[in-house]
Amino acid sequence: MDMLAVRKRLEGEKSRLEGVLDAAGRGLGGEEGVRPDQLPAEQAADTLNRELDTSVEVRVRSELAAVEAALGRLDAGRYGLCEVCGGEIAEARLEAMPAARFCVADQARAEKDARLRGAH
Ligand SMILES: [Zn+2]
């Protein structure tokens, strides 16, 4: 695998995600707020929009954390190794998801666990 190309991809992804967070940060809070002359329905819509913004921000932050972790593994010479079993992650999988943390089997297990937890 071409580690230099991987690093370039991860760093590009990192600055893209940081740009998204920057834009989200400017869009949140600020001068908008709830105006006293607003109808309750408009206030509810505003709240919904802020919640959507927040969920996008949470997702982008977790993507950014994954990219930073992948860069850290690259520095440590452990890039492409599953965090659970230590096995090699398939190259095709890394091509599709350069920040992948788990091999296919452990990813499937992690997603199953998350679904089970979500059911409660
Ligand atoms: Zn694994």
Image (spheres, rainbow, N blue to C red):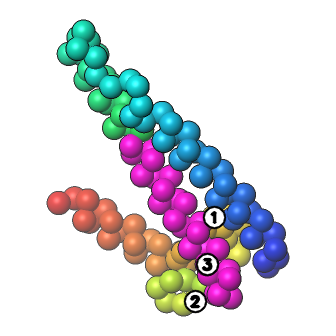
Magenta residue span: 54-80
Indicate which disc residue 18 carries. Answer: none
As measured in the structure, the alpha-carbon distance from the residue carrying label 1 to the one carrying label 3 is 16 Å
Circle 2 is placed at which residue position?
87
Badge 3: few (under 14), some or many (20 or more) residues near its Cα, within 10 Å? few
Circle 3 is placed at which residue position?
72
Q: Nearer the viewer, residue 108 or 14?
A: 14
Q: Residue at x 25, y 65 (%)?
A: 117
Q: Nearer the viewer, residue 86 or 19?
A: 19
As measured in the structure, the alpha-carbon distance from the residue carrying label 3 to the one carrying label 2 is 17 Å
Amino acid type indicated by mark 3 = Gly
Circle 1 is placed at which residue position?
97
As measured in the structure, the alpha-carbon distance from the residue carrying label 1 to the one carrying label 2 is 16 Å
Q: Where does the C terminus fall, quadrant-wise?
A: bottom left
Q: Where does the N terminus fall, quadrant-wise?
A: bottom right
Amino acid type indicated by mark 1 = Met
Badge 2: few (under 14), some or many (20 or more) residues near its Cα, within 10 Å? few
Q: Position of residue 17 (x, y in %)?
A: 60, 52
Amino acid type indicated by mark 2 = Gly
The disc, 1 or 3, on the residue closer to the chain's N-terminal end is: 3
Q: Residue at x 57, y 89 (%)?
A: 87
